[in-house]
């Protein structure tokens, strides 16, 4: 930890994270690259408020396939972020936002280096976040090569993991920052550890720091950011949901019900219990649940839709600008730290 003097003659502690991302203020809050809900505007506003925002870049890196053209969308969002951060005239200046990729699609091995890296080179975000690689891509060294190429280009590499095995693979393959999603991840001396999962306010930040994290990532809290593209019915459901322990459910069946096929089974998700999950828990076979889901979707009914959210969703109940969320959470955390210092 380096200690420097700010112009206010106040002693400001500079952590390694502040060194990597000079605009950040402590404790550092990262916004997660949530596909379908985070975007260039949200990420830029988080960064402007002294946090650091990630833009989701999806999973499809081949423009020849029938799937969505995620890289074209990414280019647009990065351009939006650059404009909002007032760096349009300074295209060579690194952009203080990150980009989050999901790696479990077949196009990772065939097209990530040839198609995704040029988009990153063009827009120069400061960080790249990797998540959910295929087992075979890890084993064959595809991910290691991707990390090497990202480093060659100067990007700080975040790697989101959920198991100790994945932490070890991430460290072995060269990650600079491990995003420990959940409770069972371990650390490593040379790697920064950022905690994710169930953190929605300053108390959660302090708890994560006390456990040894260098900073935090929040996802669910930003689902109610004004800039998020979360559908309105989902925002309303999130705002009124209480008691995340009993009102959310973690399982892979929700992906089966809504027909998402890209996730390997180890990557299940947590969602708010709606009619589809209720039916699953009451023994309705998945095939029938899929039929009911499609029928409801065709009628425009939202009660069977899947709303992904973390277990602390019960504490997330108001729509706010993303920058306000970052500042509020940071101030709450600093206040809580002071209160604790006064206690002992
Ligand atoms: C709606 C939603 C979408 C998400 N999408 C992604 C994604 O596209 N890529 C990714 O790496 N993580 C994704 N995540 C996980 C986040 O990166 C992060 O780990 C998680 O939100 C942290 O837990 P919290 O929601 O309790 O804050 C998503 C999370 C949510 C709630």
Image (cartoon, helix red, strand yellow):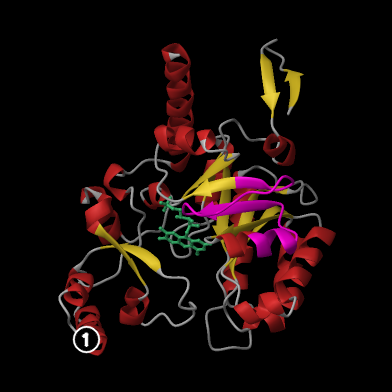
Tell me if residue 236 can be seen: no
Badge 1 is on which residue?
A: 285
- Helix, strand or loop under label 1: loop
User: What x and y, as percent, mark residue 310?
Assistant: 36, 54
User: What x and y, as percent, mark residue 234?
Assistant: 28, 59
- Compared with residue 89, is residue 256 higher up or lower down, i.e. above or below? below
Q: Is residue 313 or residue 321 the one in the foreground?
A: 313
Q: Residues within 10 Å of mark 1 (few under 14, many from 20)?
A: few
User: What x and y, as percent, mark residue 305?
Assistant: 26, 71
- Compared with residue 57, is residue 66 higher up or lower down, i.e. above or below? below
Tell me if residue 245 can be seen: yes
- Compared with residue 85, is residue 65 higher up or lower down, i.e. above or below? below
Q: CB at mark 1 closer than 8 A to ligand 1?
A: no
Q: Residue at x 80, y 50 (%)?
A: 92
Q: In screen coordinates, is 279 left or right of 193? A: left
Q: Quadrant of the C terminus?
A: top left
**Among all residues in the image, which is located at the extreme right?**
152
Q: In screen coordinates, is 230 left or right of 264? A: left
**Magenta run includes residue 188:** yes
Magenta region: 168-193
**Magenta run includes residue 231:** no
Q: In screen coordinates, is 328 left or right of 97? A: left
**Among all residues in the image, which is located at the extreme left?**
282
User: What x and y, as percent, mark residue 35?
Assistant: 48, 64
């Amino acid at each position: 930890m380096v200690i420097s003097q700010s112009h206010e003659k106040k002693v400001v502690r500079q952590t390694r994270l502040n060194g990597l991302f000079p605009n950040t203020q402590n404790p550092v809050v990262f916004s997660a690259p949530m596909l379908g809900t985070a975007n260039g505007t949200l990420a830029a506003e988080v960064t402007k408020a002294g946090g650091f925002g990630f833009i989701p870049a999806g999973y499809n890196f081949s423009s020849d396939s029938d799937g969505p053209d995620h890289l074209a969308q990414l280019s647009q969002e990065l351009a939006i972020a650059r404009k909002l951060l007032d760096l349009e005239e300074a295209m060579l200046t690194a952009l203080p936002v990150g980009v989050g990729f999901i790696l479990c699609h077949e196009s990772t091995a065939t097209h990530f280096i040839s198609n995704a890296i040029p988009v990153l080179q063009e827009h120069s975000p400061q960080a790249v976040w990797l998540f959910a690689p295929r087992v075979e891509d890890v084993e064959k060294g595809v991910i290691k090569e991707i990390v090497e190429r990202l480093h060659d280009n100067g990007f700080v590499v975040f790697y989101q993991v959920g198991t100790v095995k994945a932490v070890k693979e991430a460290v072995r393959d060269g990650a600079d920052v491990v995003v420990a999603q959940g409770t069972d991840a371990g650390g490593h001396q040379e790697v920064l550890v950022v905690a994710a999962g169930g953190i929605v306010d300053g108390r959660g930040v302090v708890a994560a720091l006390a456990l040894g994290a260098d900073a935090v990532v929040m996802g669910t809290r930003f689902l109610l950011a004004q800039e998020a593209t979360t559908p309105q019915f989902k925002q309303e459901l999130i705002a009124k949901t209480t008691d995340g322990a009993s009102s959310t459910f973690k399982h892979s069946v929700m992906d089966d019900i809504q027909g998402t096929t890209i996730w390997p089974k180890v990557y299940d998700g947590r969602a708010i219990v709606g009619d589809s999950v209720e039916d699953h828990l009451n023994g309705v076979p998945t095939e029938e649940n899929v039929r009911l889901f499609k029928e409801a979707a065709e009628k425009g009914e939202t009660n069977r839709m899947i709303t992904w959210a973390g277990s602390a969703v019960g504490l997330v109940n108001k729509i706010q600008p993303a920058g306000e969320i970052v500042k509020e959470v940071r101030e709450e955390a600093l206040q809580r730290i002071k209160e604790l210092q006064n206690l002992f």
